[in-house]
Amino acid sequence: MQIVEHENYNSPKRWSNDIALLKLSRSALLQNGVGLVCLSDDQFQLPFTETSKKCWTTGWGTLSYGGFKPIVLRQVDLPLVSPQRCSHLYLTRYDANTMICAGRVWGGVGTCHGDSGGPLVCEFNGKWYLEGVTSWIGLPCGTVNKPAVFAYVRKFKSWIIRKMNNALVPNIATDCGYTIDSTLKSPGYPSFYPKNTLCVYDVPIPCDEELVIYFIYFRLEYIWHCSHDYLKIRDGRNRTIGTFCGQQTGRSILVNDSIAVLTFKTDGSVQFNGFHLSFSFFPRGSATLPPVVSPPGQY
Ligand SMILES: [Ca+2]
């Protein structure tokens, strides 16, 4: 696992930029209790003024100030608190560029010790979006006019995407090709790819979108079951979408998940020119794949 901390954590104020990314060494298994949330989206307006519209936070933190921790995950709905109001309540401690506040005026509910790092999610059009990461709260927790403060995910979106895109560079071998304008070329392309290569590329797929990988050019050594050289495409649930070798130029592959993982492996003999792929993103359910005529060597 890799931890990507924010470079400006605790600056300019205490707990400013209180956010980090975890890159898992393998994909999480999505199942009961483990799911995905959409990254906040600027097309939806945050409900600072709609007191009827609540956002929710969850956590394993203490049930009262200095109290016990729960044995089940707890959740509570909280109205957002406007930046003006939060700035008024917390004065010098509040950093409008990196913090967002939520809580009821009279307190009684909210975050407390042990909840930090948990989510603040809001619903738009029937989907849940991550808008905050639990950071700190005025003590004692749950008192009047002490809203919970969260890392302001919207303000970190470009930072998150930048850090995630850095993950698009291969995470095992070096000299594994590179990306330009949403395309990926095999190492050495258009010349022969090297022998005994293993490259793994992660392609993050935005929420509510699906990915079409188009093989602009594709030529690997062809052998039954692609056991010598291959490009394997898997999704975030570790399901294999396809393992490809031989001549596959013109093929399109659809990935409907949060990430596509591409593994390129070559053996010690017989090289070809490799591949040049392009990545296109479409709203989920809207991509159409052109038919491929008599594809050789795909399993
Ligand atoms: Ca080979």
Image: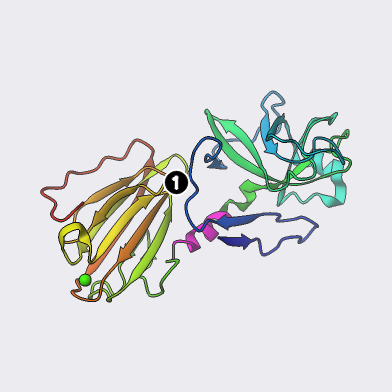
| Residue 41 in view of the camera | no
Residue 172's x, y, as percent?
A: 43, 68
Which quadrant of the rendered structure holds the N terminus? bottom right
- Is 83 on the left-hand or right-hand side of 90? left
Q: Residue at x 66, y 26 (%)?
A: 53
Residue 164 colored in magenta in the image:
yes
Q: Which residues are magenta?
A: 160-169
Within the image, what quadrant is residue 8 found in? bottom right
Q: Quadrant of residue 45?
A: top right
Query: For mark 1, does the 10 Å Cα neighbourhood hold few (<14), some (14 to 19), or many (20 or more) residues?
Result: some
Q: Is residue 256 above or below residue 233?
A: above
Q: Nearer the viewer, residue 249 or 108?
A: 108
Q: Position of residue 265 (x, y in %)?
A: 30, 66
Inspect this view and state whether residue 26 appears.
yes
**Residue name at image x 80 percent, y 44 percent:** 113
Q: x, y percentage for residue 25?
A: 50, 58
- Identify the amino acid type marked 1: Ser
Which quarter of the picture shows residue 184? bottom left
Would you say 133 lies left or right of 174 here? right
Question: Furthest-front residue in view?
Answer: 71
Magenta-colored segment: predominant secondary structure: helix
Name the residue: 84% across, 31% down: 107
| Residue 154 position within the rendered picture, expressed as x and y whole percent measured from the top left | 62, 46
* Ligand 1 found in image quarter: bottom left
In the picture as drawn, the residue positioned furthest to the left comes out as 294
Q: Depth check: 92 or 212 in front?
A: 212
Q: Secondary structure at mark 1?
A: loop
Which residue corresponds to the image point at 60% horizontal and 41% vertical from the top-left?
130
Residue tagged 1: 258
| In magenta segment, residue 264 | no
